[in-house]
Image: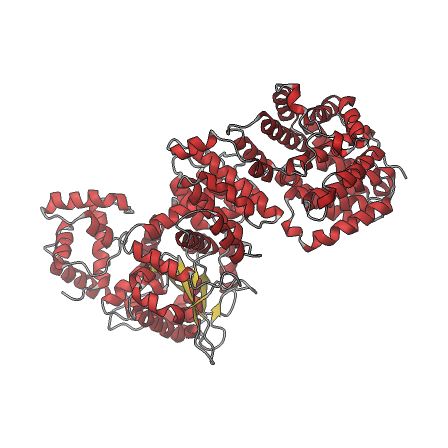
Amino acid sequence: MSKISLPKYEELKKLLLVNAGIANILPSECRALSDRVYKKNGNRISETTFKRIYGFAYSKYNPSLFTLNVLARFCNFKGWDDFCEKQDQKASAATTKELSWRLIQQNASKITNFTLQALKNKSGIPYNQTIDREFIDHHFEEFINSEHTGTVLTAPAGYGKTIALCQWVEKKFEVDALNDVNDIILLFSSNAIMSALMSGRDIHDWMLALLGYHVENDINVLMDVKQRGKSKFYLIIDGFDEHMFKGDHFRVIMNQLVDIFSFYQSHDWFKLVLTARTATWINNRHEFDIGTGGWYTGFKKDDNCINVPLFSVQEIKLLCHQIKPGIEDFISLNVVENFNHPLYFQFYYQQHKDNFLQNNIDHLSFYETISTFILKKVYLGQYSAEKMLLIKGLVEELDIRNEHYQINKLKVANILKKYPHAYQELLSVGFVREVNTSSIHQFNTDILFGNNEFMEHSIAKTLLYDNSNLLDADLIKTINELFTLSPRKVNVLKWCLIHAIKTGQLKSVENIIDVHLNTNEKSEIITFLGEVLESEHSSSGRNDALTQYFKHSFSEKLFDYFFGLELVSSDYKKFLQVLLRFELSNKNKILIHSALAIIAAMQLDLNELEVNLAKLKAFPKADFETFPVNPLTCLDAIFYHLKYGIIKTEALTDLTKLSFSSPGEIVNFKCTATNDMLFLLGLHTLALSNNPLKQLRFIKFLNHNYCAEMSDNHSSQYRFFIKTIEASSYFVMGELEKVSEIYEDISINYKKCHTLATSYMRMVFHSLKIKTLVNAGKEIQIATEIKQVNNIAAQFGYKFAKLYILSILLKSPMLQNSAPELYRQINYDFNKLTRDSGLNLKLFLETITIRK
């Protein structure tokens, strides 16, 4: 039997479920259904066969006559032929009835509901826990109200096209029922379309047959305005992608769809909806370009033919609450953007079904999710070795130095010919994609990786493979040469770090100090390294190499690399806590607890500040004599001021003496990042004296003596902070012209590379800008800068800096008179932040005076 009647086969499948007492079949019920059929008939149909029958597994061929006979006998027929004969009798009797729009609608609804159930069962996250997405309603509203006949939802693999479509169809059914609208919605998956093609049917005839038409019928009912009224007919095909079909099947189906589209294009009641990957649409859109007013896409400029957006922050929060109701904040804003890809969120959920969000999601969670995807879709299964060789070959064709990441297909024709099955596998899972950008003058098809993450992972693995899988000086040199100014350098380096730590190359981590990184990139790498080390240390299966690694101290050079005031943040705090797991000298432990105390002060976490002070006080006094600035006395003075409003003078006295010292009298006066931090801590402590001249004197001392011989090469971040503190001193003295001069000097470089600045540097810069505006009558600009300060403080917890700048604004009579509404909001924010932090309301206002 080469062909079967598809409508009769579909009817038999429905009847089988009715006789088995199953309303909506799930994959897990196929085994029980197999047993039930065997008990009644004595013939076994396997669980796998039932999964193929109901669309849970791929089916290349039609079911055998044996299978059809067993199914028919289970439904109380003598066999398949008897079932077909009875169906023909029913159909013959039905021909006496008039085929109506309502009957077509009922038939279409049955098919659509079946397709919906099949698609929903394939959802990576349980369908009842998915969320409605606003974009789909807006897209269809625009499409339906337009004159276009067709629309397409297009995005790379894993953007959630199918789930969004299912949700829209279900909502459409509900709304139509409430408003007595008789629109017909006929939804198919690409698997159903492929099955129809395999049975030798024309798609149009097959579709009409499913709706109840027979050979002798025509389509007058669809054209009958009296019956149809204002109703519309929606033909929806999900997953119309090249990789789903073999050989020329895709072309055959596309040509038939184009014929259907052309036939109904002049009828405003007919609407064709497709979902497809972006590459499929780009490669074939010229085939659908028929006449005028054909397709509504909703594409915007520079969206690369993607009209399905990634998750927004609000959608991620809603989805998490849907999966685990009542959960509190769990993802920091600087991590959440990594999980805005629905596919990655789905894989994270599948990895953590039983403990979803019990632990905070961090940057490493994202990389582990990508690794899981690559393991399942690339490393495992058929042609895995071939896929790896093909990926390596594609990476070698990338022009990384010039950031050209498109590969001309003709240039890699030989390797594609060598690994055709591997290539098709990679296309099918979205690891790579093809984009045809040919013009009338030239053929051009490019191969691209499915997304940046897949490409960066592939580049890292290829570089490691070519370097004997070692993270050594040679690999670092290669990374520096290939990624001179590329933003991809950091992510490639992250993959290399994961590999090194997972394979026991712990000492190789020290090589990262030779990577050419800007300040922001360095901060990102340090945060990530802390997460990887913490994860490995906490793992029950950590290797011996890691255990031994934590028993040793960092080299002084590497330890110094990890310090800097510009790095302070909540993520940096986690990294410092990981460092404390190592066998460290008292000196380094003191530096770490001092940095943790500084972060606590910046976040106005007085309890945490007190805890770290207690740990510092536990060290012998002699250990503090090795520092040019005593961090304990400085932090103790800051704590007493914030907690009790008392200024302890010991630190102020020591810092004043230091200002009059000669370099030879000062211990450990070397130019290091840890000393940078200590001197900046000293300058902030001197602010407690409310005497800006002391700060300026200390700055002058540092400029003349500290790192003077290498001032041109000294840390630009250190000089940035020195200049901003200097500007703050002049501000308190009322010398606003000097404040503006310093601001203009700093802003030249800041504006050139503001994206390279860390979060704390951005906070300090915006605070400095406010000082230049506070008495200049520029209320609108002040409001803009305050918004920036609020956003950074909310994201990174810099409460001290925010409170300080708010107190300055509250001391401005000009702002109070010219912008009373803004002033009231500032006053409200100041009072709330002060109360929430457990501080005295008068503390900042009394100790800060602006001298004119």
* Residue 269 visible at all: no
- Looking at the picture, how far across and down is residue 537, in whole percent? 44, 32
* Residue 830 visible at all: yes
Q: Residue furthest front?
A: 664
- Looking at the picture, how far across and down is residue 109, in whole percent? 34, 57
Q: Residue furthest right?
A: 852
Quarter-of-image position of residue 644: top right
Relative depth, front residue between 297 and 455: 455
Residue located at (20% from left, 55% from top):
12
Q: Is residue 783 left or right of residue 391?
A: right
Residue located at (26% from left, 43% from top):
28
- Looking at the picture, how far across and down is residue 623, in whole percent? 64, 23
Tell me the colour scheme of the image: secondary structure
Vertical placement of 361 versus 280: above or below? above
Relative depth, front residue between 158 and 576: 576
Q: Is residue 402 left or right of residue 250?
A: right
Q: How many badges with numbers are in the image? A: 0
Residue located at (12% from left, 48% from top):
44
Q: Quadrant of the N terminus?
A: bottom left
Quarter-of-image position of residue 645: top right
- Looking at the picture, how far across and down is residue 229, in whole percent? 43, 66
Vertical placement of 36 versus 238: above or below? above
Q: Quadrant of the C terminus?
A: top right
Q: Is residue 173 left or right of residue 527?
A: left
Vertical placement of 539 versus 755: above or below? above
Relative depth, front residue between 263 and 675: 675
Quarter-of-image position of residue 575: top right
